[in-house]
Image (spheres, helix red, strand yellow):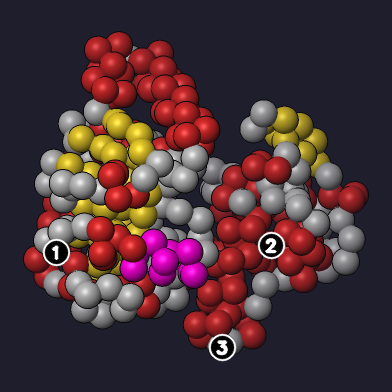
């Protein structure tokens, strides 16, 4: 596989495009607006500058990486002559089903269709296509250029050939692919999101404050950041969406999202992306704890 299309130029999409382009793939980066694409390319440039500053790559490597990326506002144009499409749109099931139904019509039958979904069933996504054997999950971790893991999710009909090819492609990106089966939340978020939700419940019930909860998990459990700070980075809206997938998929009340999480998302407090979540953020930097603002 040489030609890759990435659907979505947000945090995950531009990171995925960055990594493929850095390793010599020709990348079509697709989004609905040119302004979103321009923002995505600017982010890739800044992240490449960080790699140059750390002497991980050269200026020539940066230039070559950017030259490997072409932007498109037309999905039809962007997916011409590609071998693999990686969808990295918003974590919304209806949107993803629409994208995959369109991709099935717009791409050649041999093209592998992958989703970066963090929780939505690959089998369900594959069912809207005529090639369920060629639909697979490639769940990259954020930030994509830094994190090694790629969760490779096999749908019910995903073939061995496609799975092996995507695993090998991930290794060529200097990633560590791990094959998992298609159940709600897969492995990463089936374990991570209930922990984050439980941390929010602990705050909601007044057991401890934001900094106290995060400090216990950092110093007591050797986590690089606390679960509430991590939730802010992921996006509280994303955390809520994943908890809802788990709750719907398993039908178990233990996966019910905390009411505080629901209320914060409804109030627009989504974490770093909105400037305020469990912490207040300025230009992505944590400023102060806002625990005193929480309402049950």
Q: Earlier in the sequence, mark 2 or mark 1?
A: 1
Which one is in front in this view, the residue at disc 1 or the one at disc 3? 1
- From the image, which quarter does the C terminus lie in? bottom right
Q: Is residue 43 above or below residue 213?
A: above
Q: Nearer the viewer, residue 78 or 164?
A: 78
Q: Position of residue 163 (x, y in %)?
A: 17, 64
Residue 195 shows up from this direction: no
Q: Secondary structure at mark 2?
A: helix
Graded by Cα atoms within 10 Å as few (under 14), some (14 to 19) or many (20 or more), the crowding at tag 2 reads many
Which one is in front in this view, the residue at disc 3 or the one at disc 2? 3
Graded by Cα atoms within 10 Å as few (under 14), some (14 to 19) or many (20 or more), the crowding at tag 1 reads few
Q: Is residue 170 above or below residue 70?
A: below
Q: Report which residue position mark 3 lands on.
A: 251
96 within the magenta span: yes
Q: Position of residue 105 (x, y in %)?
A: 26, 64
Per the rendered image, the range of residues in magenta is: 93-101
Q: Report which residue position mark 2 lands on.
A: 199
Q: Earlier in the sequence, mark 1 or mark 3?
A: 1
Which one is in front in this view, the residue at disc 2 or the one at disc 1? 1
Residue 109 shows up from this direction: yes
Q: What's the magenta bit mostly, secondary-structure-wise?
A: helix
Q: Report which residue position mark 1 lands on.
A: 109
**For the residues marked 3 and 2, what is the alpha-carbon distance in whole angstroms?**
21 Å
Which corner quadrant of the image does residue 69 belong to? Answer: top left
Q: Earlier in the sequence, mark 3 or mark 2?
A: 2
Label pair 3/2, CB-CB below 8 angstroms: no
């Amino acid at each position: 596989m040489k030609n890759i299309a990435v659907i979505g130029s947000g945090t995950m999409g531009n990171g995925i495009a960055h990594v493929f382009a850095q390793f010599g793939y020709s990348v079509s980066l697709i989004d609905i607006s040119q302004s979103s694409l321009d923002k995505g390319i600017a982010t890739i440039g800044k992240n490449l500058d960080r790699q140059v500053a750390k002497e991980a790559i050269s200026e020539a490597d940066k230039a070559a990486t950017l030259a490997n990326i072409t932007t498109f506002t037309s999905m039809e144009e962007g997916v011409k002559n590609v071998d693999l499409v990686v969808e990295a749109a918003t974590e919304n099931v209806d949107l993803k089903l629409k994208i995959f139904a369109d991709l099935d019509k717009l791409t050649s039958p041999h093209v592998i269709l992958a989703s970066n979904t963090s929780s939505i069933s690959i089998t369900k996504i594959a069912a809207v296509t005529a090639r369920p054997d060629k639909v697979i999950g490639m769940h990259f971790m954020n930030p994509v250029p830094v994190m090694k893991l790629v969760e490779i999710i096999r749908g019910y009909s995903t073939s061995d050939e496609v799975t092996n090819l995507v695993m090998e492609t991930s290794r060529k990106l200097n990633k560590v692919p791990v094959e998992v089966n298609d159940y709600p939340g897969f492995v990463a978020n089936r374990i991570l999101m209930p922990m984050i939700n439980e941390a929010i419940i602990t705050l909601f019930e007044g057991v401890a404050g934001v900094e106290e909860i995060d400090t216990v998990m950092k110093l007591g459990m050797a986590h690089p950041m606390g679960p509430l700070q991590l939730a802010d980075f992921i996006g509280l809206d994303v955390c809520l969406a994943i908890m809802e997938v788990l709750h719907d998929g398993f039908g178990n009340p233990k996966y019910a999202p905390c009411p505080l999480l629901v209320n914060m998302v409804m109030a627009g407090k989504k974490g770093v992306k909105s400037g305020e979540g469990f912490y207040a953020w300025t230009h992505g930097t944590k400023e102060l704890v806002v625990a005193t603002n929480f309402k049950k």
